[in-house]
Image: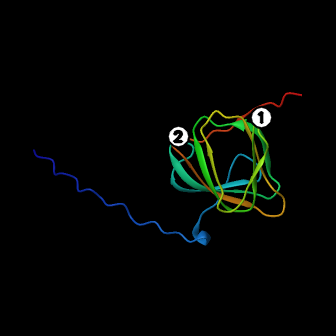
């Protein structure tokens, strides 16, 4: 018996106002995520992330490259051995992965940014040497 060929289904348009985004708490206090596509726990994804004002996640690395574009607030990023940089709205950061860095959101306003990774998200804390 001949099996009928499946028709290709065109992807549906996805247009969300900021107010339509579904924010979910993460395992980390003060951080929420709204996945736009993919699943950060399984593989490639794009998402909006929100750090509550004053959130500090400390020194860490990620396995996979992470690129982000700031939407609001001021994120403070410090790569080991380099001075800290403040990234405000429209700013961009590209972490190639396996780079030790420190991330925090300046007090005064939540930090909202778009993030993309080709692989799943992970957070690998790095102990500070005293």
Q: In the figure, is residue 9 to the left or right of 27? A: left
Residue 118 locus on image (x, y percent): 51, 43
Q: Quarter of the image containing the C terminus?
A: top right
Q: Residue furthest right?
A: 130
Find numbered disc 1 in the image and state the secondary structure of the residue it sits on: loop
Of the pair 66 and 10, the residue shown nearer to us: 66
Label 2 sits on residue: 119
Precedes in sequence: disc 1 or disc 2: 1
Q: Is residue 22 above or below residue 5?
A: below
Q: Is residue 120 above or below residue 16?
A: above
Q: Quarter of the image containing the N terminus?
A: top left
The residue at 67%/35% (across/down) is 99
Q: What colour scheme was applied to this rendering of the protein?
A: rainbow
The residue at 59%/65% (across/down) is 21
The residue at 52%/41% (across/down) is 42
Instruction: Mark 1 and mark 2 in contact? Answer it, CB < 8 Å.
Output: no
Please identify the quarter of the rendering in which residue 49 is found. Answer: bottom right
Label 1 sits on residue: 81
Find numbered disc 2 in the image and state the secondary structure of the residue it sits on: loop
What is the spatial separation of the Cα atoms under label 1 and label 2, in whole angstroms? Answer: 26 Å
Within 10 angstroms of label 2, few (less than 14), some, or many (20 or more) residues?
Answer: some
Of the pair 41 and 95, the residue shown nearer to us: 95
Mark nearer the viewer, 1 or 2: 1
């Amino acid at each position: 018996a001949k099996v009928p060929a499946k028709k290709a289904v065109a992807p549906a348009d996805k247009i969300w106002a900021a107010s339509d985004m579904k924010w979910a708490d993460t395992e980390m206090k003060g951080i929420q995520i709204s996945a736009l596509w993919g699943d950060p726990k399984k593989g490639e994804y794009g998402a909006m992330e929100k750090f509550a004002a004053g959130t500090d996640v400390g020194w860490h690395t990620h396995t996979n490259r992470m690129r982000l574009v700031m939407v609001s607030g001021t994120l403070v990023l410090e790569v080991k051995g380099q001075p800290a940089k403040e990234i405000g709205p429209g700013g961009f950061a590209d972490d190639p992965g396996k780079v030790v860095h420190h991330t925090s959101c300046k007090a005064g306003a939540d930090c909202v940014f778009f993030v993309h990774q080709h692989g799943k998200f992970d957070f690998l804390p790095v102990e500070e040497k005293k």
